[in-house]
């Protein structure tokens, strides 16, 4: 019999590993929930045009990596390759920016899809937690988001990551730099693809990882030499706020990030324990994106952190998260009457907030105790006919091995007391 397998470049998240992924998602979301960010969920697919306009025609994401489909009605859709364009589209559609309270602060969590060559840390389906602050131009917002991501990583116990920081200028100074860079690139020996990229968005060429391209880029004009005074001042304020918060970062003038919509502040979180796929997350300011997708001027800033990459970073640092046991109490009934009564006890325990499970399938005592052991439960309740005749159950502490009889009607209270 042939069995189906997950598509190439994807993975299934299954217990017990999935518990770590959930804990990572929660750790990243916690500082956001604490800072005025509300949860948003958008569809897994959008109009192709949203990403072509928003993410940028020249990006690898749009030219090579998007999963596109044509519906029966002839609509061109794409599985979302990133979160920002969708979140901004949803905020505009719901007129959140008109509710009078800017910035609109949103956070999200979900799966994203890119057709890439699969390798460790890079999949065709991946999970991210992201945050966007929409509608306000303020260096304190840029700093806030970087600080919250730093806080999330540190709460997980990570320490060997670095924050790279740069400014990409704005619509005043970037075109001047762009022209100078295009002039420089025009004199190089570049392949057809790279030359085309340099015509659409020359900054992307700086991001080219190939050694033969990097070698030719020595002496390329630097963006920092072209920043206007307003952008310089803005960037300096972001840096001062990070310094004051004790968040360390490195200035990286080659950092451009892979999306066309970024302006001014850009940043990346990298972990040196991950080999070539070292970026665990990143983001920046995207003041022109709203207009690109047909909205009003809404200067905004945001980031997305990779959940899978963060889990790899934890592995690289040898960090095992302390996860609560999925089961605290396991019930083992011996006989029909015990089944009925203990199932009631398990239901009662669950209602009172205690994680409880049950030996299903009428297992013998040996198999049932093995199941109790595997569940990781701290306590096991065992009851047979003689126990029930006396109105008690046997409560066994799985850590110490000690066992004692407890009155059936008092067992829930006794377990709650012992679990504290």
Image (tube, rainbow, N blue to C red):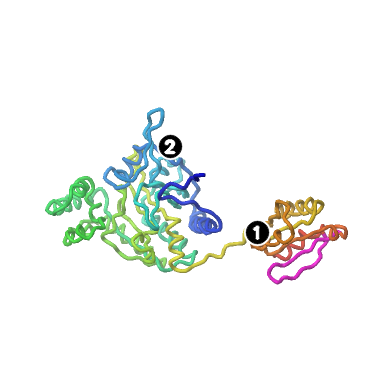
Q: Earlier in the sequence, mark 2 or mark 1?
A: 2
Where residue 294 appears, as percent x and y from the top left, is: 34, 37
On residue 182, which mark appears? none
Q: Which residue is mark 2?
A: 93
Where residue 38 appears, as percent x and y from the top left, is: 50, 48
Where residue 353 appears, as percent x and y from the top left, is: 68, 55
Horizontal side of 156 relative to 415 (left or right) equals left
Horizontal side of 364 relative to 223 (left or right) equals right
- In the image, which is nearer the foreground, mark 2 or mark 1? 1
Q: Eyeballing the image, is 9 above or below 158?
A: above
Query: Which residue extends farthest top?
Result: 73
C-alpha gap between disc 2 and disc 1: 43 Å
Residue at 80 percent across and 54 percent down: it is 335
Q: How many marks?
A: 2
> Callout 2: helix, strand or loop?
helix
Q: Residues within 10 Å of mark 1 (few under 14, many from 20)?
A: some
Residue 407 occupies which quadrant of the picture? bottom right
Residue at 50 percent across and 55 percent down: it is 25
Q: Quadrant of the C terminus?
A: bottom right
Q: Which residue is mark 1?
A: 327
The residues colored magenta run 391-407
The reply to whether the magenta stretch includes residue 393 is: yes
Do callouts 2 and 1 mark residues in contact (Cβ within 8 Å)? no
């Amino acid at each position: 019999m042939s069995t189906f397998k997950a598509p190439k470049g994807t993975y299934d998240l299954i217990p017990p590993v999935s518990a770590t992924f959930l804990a990572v998602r929660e750790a990243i979301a916690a500082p956001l929930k604490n800072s005025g960010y509300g949860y948003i969920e958008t569809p897994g697919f959008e109009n192709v045009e949203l990403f072509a306009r928003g993410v940028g025609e020249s990006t690898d994401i749009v030219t090579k990596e998007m999963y596109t489909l044509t519906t029966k009605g002839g609509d061109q859709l794409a599985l979302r390759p990133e979160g920002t364009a969708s979140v901004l589209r949803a905020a505009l559609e719901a007129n959140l920016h008109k509710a009078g309270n800017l910035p609109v602060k949103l956070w999200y969590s979900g799966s994203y899809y890119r057709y890439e060559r699969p390798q460790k840390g890079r999949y065709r389906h991946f999970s991210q937690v992201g945050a966007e602050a929409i509608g306000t131009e303020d260096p304190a917002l840029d700093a806030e988001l970087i600080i919250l991501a730093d806080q999330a990583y540190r709460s997980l116990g990570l320490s060997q990551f670095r924050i790279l920081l740069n400014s990409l200028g704005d619509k005043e100074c970037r075109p001047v730099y762009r022209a100078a860079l295009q002039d420089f690139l025009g004199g190089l020996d570049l392949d057809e693809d790279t030359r085309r990229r340099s015509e659409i968005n020359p900054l992307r060429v700086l991001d080219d990882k190939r050694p033969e391209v990097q070698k030719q880029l020595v002496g390329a004009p630097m963006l920092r030499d072209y920043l206007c005074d307003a952008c310089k001042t803005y960037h300096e304020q972001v840096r001062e706020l990070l310094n004051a918060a004790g968040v360390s970062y490195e200035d990286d003038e080659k950092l451009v990030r892979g999306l066309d919509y970024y302006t001014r502040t850009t940043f990346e979180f990298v972990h040196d324990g991950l080999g070539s796929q070292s970026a665990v997350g990143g983001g920046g300011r995207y003041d022109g994106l709203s207009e690109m997708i047909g909205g009003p001027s809404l200067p905004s800033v945001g980031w997305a952190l990779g959940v899978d990459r963060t889990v790899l970073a934890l592995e690289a640092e040898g960090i095992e998260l302390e996860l609560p046991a999925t089961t605290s109490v396991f019930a083992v009934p011996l006989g029909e009457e015990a089944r009925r009564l203990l199932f009631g006890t398990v239901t009662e325990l669950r209602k009172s907030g205690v994680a409880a499970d049950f030996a299903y399938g009428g297992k013998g005592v040996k198999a049932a105790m093995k199941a109790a052991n595997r569940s990781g439960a701290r306590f096991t309740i065992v009851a047979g006919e003689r126990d029930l005749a006396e109105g008690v159950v046997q409560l066994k502490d799985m850590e110490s091995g000690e066992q004692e009889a407890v009155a059936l009607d008092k067992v829930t209270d006794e377990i709650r007391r012992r679990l504290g």
